[in-house]
Image (cartoon, rainbow, N blue to C red):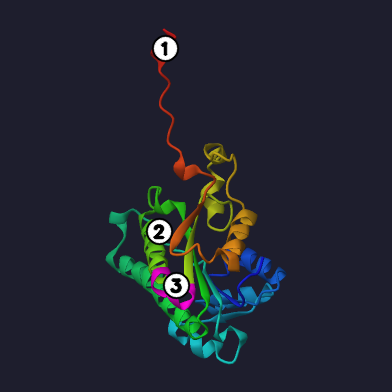
Amino acid sequence: MKLLDPVLIRGMSCELGQTLARALVAEGCRVLGICRSEESRTRLQEAGFEAVCAEAPEVLPALLAGTVFHAPKAFVDCAHSQTESLVAALAPEQIDRWSLEDIAARARYLRTVVRLMLPGREGRCLFISSAALAAPARGQGYYAAAKAAGEALYASVGLEMAGRGITTCSLRLGWMDAGRGHAYLRNRTGLAGLVPTGHLVSLEEACGGLLYLLSQGARSINATVVTMDGGFSQTKPEAPQDRTAAL
């Protein structure tokens, strides 16, 4: 499986991002993490990864000039919203911050990376989405909205840039006992029994899917969403048992 290389990963400090980075390096790819804080960059460097801290997306070209990453062939956006609240409960200034950090920043990073890819007329951009987009839990309205905006942006780029060699895809993940999923799943037993496959999405499965989507053979999977949730989004609650049948 021939993978696109080199690869930029935004939000690589998360568990999925680091696991994917290790898998890519094992396949011989060059990987660079993009962080929004020096703390995250230091944490990645201590873990053995190369990373840069971009105060704004527009400084990336200058940061990458003269490196092998100045013309990336792949970009994976693992960054996710930290905003969880009832929609009517969030303060106006918090809503403004959410829209800047979780929607506008994503659009600006995507714009910047696509422009880096254009001279080489080859590139692949992947967005890590969530099944919460289609079925948000109580308090996930802002998180789901940020994912919906991300999917829309990536789909549009795939339509606009495919003729110039740049394609996109969003991977919509279901319940996964990793990263932010640890806290959610800690006190919720039995969820795996609701998934048709009988198990939650594993890090290995998620990374395997991403590696395939980053391969040369997957670039016709463009401007669309791939769902990896064990089939949960296709299920429906069972109807209550008809007690009259036993009478």
Amino acid residing under circle 2 = Tyr
Which quadrant of the figure has residue 146?
A: bottom left
In whole angstroms, how far apart are the C-alphas of marks 1 and 2? 44 Å
Q: 31 above or below 142?
A: below
Q: Is residue 161 left or right of residue 228?
A: left
Which of the image's four quarters has the C terminus? top left
Indicate which disc residue 143 carries. Answer: 2
In depth, the one of 6 and 17 nearer the eye is: 6
**For this view, does 60 lie left or right of residue 22?**
left
Q: Look at 48% across and 74% down and name the residue there.
A: 166
What label sits on residue 245 in the rendered view? 1
Q: Amino acid at mark 3?
A: Ala
Residue 135 horizontal side relative to residue 214, left or right: left
User: In this view of the protein, which residue sits in the foreground, 39 or 20?
Assistant: 20
- Left or right: residue 54 versus residue 26 is left
Secondary structure beneath disc 2?
helix
What residue is shown with label 3? 162
Magenta stretch?
A: 158-166
Give the dominant element type of the magenta stretch: helix, strand or loop: helix
Q: Earlier in the sequence, mark 3 or mark 1?
A: 3
> Where residue 129 appears, x then y in whole percent?
47, 59
Labelled pair 3, 1 in contact (Cβ < 8 Å): no
Instruction: Classify 10 Å Cα crowding around label 2: few (below 14), some (14-19), many (20 and above).
Output: many
* Residue ID at (58%, 51%): 177
- Going by the numbered disc 1, the residue's amino acid type is Ala
